[in-house]
Amino acid sequence: MYEKIIGESCRFFADLPKSELDQFLSLCTFRHIPQGTTLWHEGDAGDHAVLILNGKLGLKKKAQFGNRHLIVGIHTAGSMIGENSMLNSEPRTVTAEAIETTDLVIITAEQFETLLETRPQLGAVILRHIAISTSRRLEQAYERLTVLF
């Protein structure tokens, strides 16, 4: 499993020493998601984030008018999604669905709090990775907005 997590397609933890990655992963769970599976719906309570090891997840949001959804993101290996709900316990802002069969690492808010309490330096490194990932996604959203206007 370690090779998948630090391999070519998933670089989220590429700079993390194996011993620290092992400590982080010992708190997490792994899940294999068949294509078409919905992980969560917009508005659901959220208490975990997922890191994509392989496959693709699509994120969609309800349109303001009508009963339509807009695709707001397609994420592949190395992407973490759901981190906002994990960190602030707010309801999900999007629906997440497996576009392809996908392998995930799942970390709950409780597991992340345990990490911060027991290994604060490692927790800070993970928070940094989450911030970078979120920042990149925000930059991509800005780019998509410029195409619309």
Image (tube, helix red, strand yellow):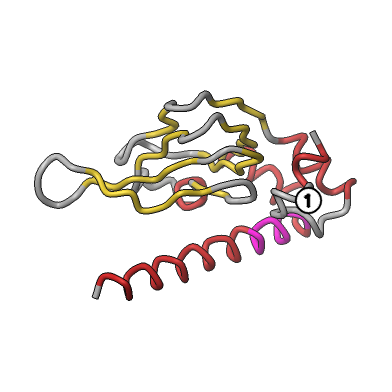
Residue plotted at (31% across, 41% down): 42
Task: Provide residue 4's location: percent of width, then percent of height.
Answer: 76, 39
The correct choice, above or below, for 129 with respect to 81 in the image is below
Placement of the N terminus among the 4 image quadrants: top right
Relative to 149, 74 lies left or right: right
**Extreme residue in the left direction:** 66
Residue plotted at (46% across, 49% down): 74
Residue plotted at (58% across, 38% down): 55
Tell me if I can see residue 60 in this picture. Answer: yes
Placement of the C terminus among the 4 image quadrants: bottom left
Q: Helix or strand or loop: what does disc 1 sit on?
A: loop
Q: Which span is picked out in magenta?
A: 122-129
Q: Quadrant of residue 5?
A: top right
Dot 1 surroundings within 10 Å: few (below 14), some, or many (20 or more)?
Answer: some
Residue pointed to by mark 1: 119
Relative to 44, 68 lies left or right: left
Relative to 64, 15 lies left or right: right
Magenta region includes residue 124? yes
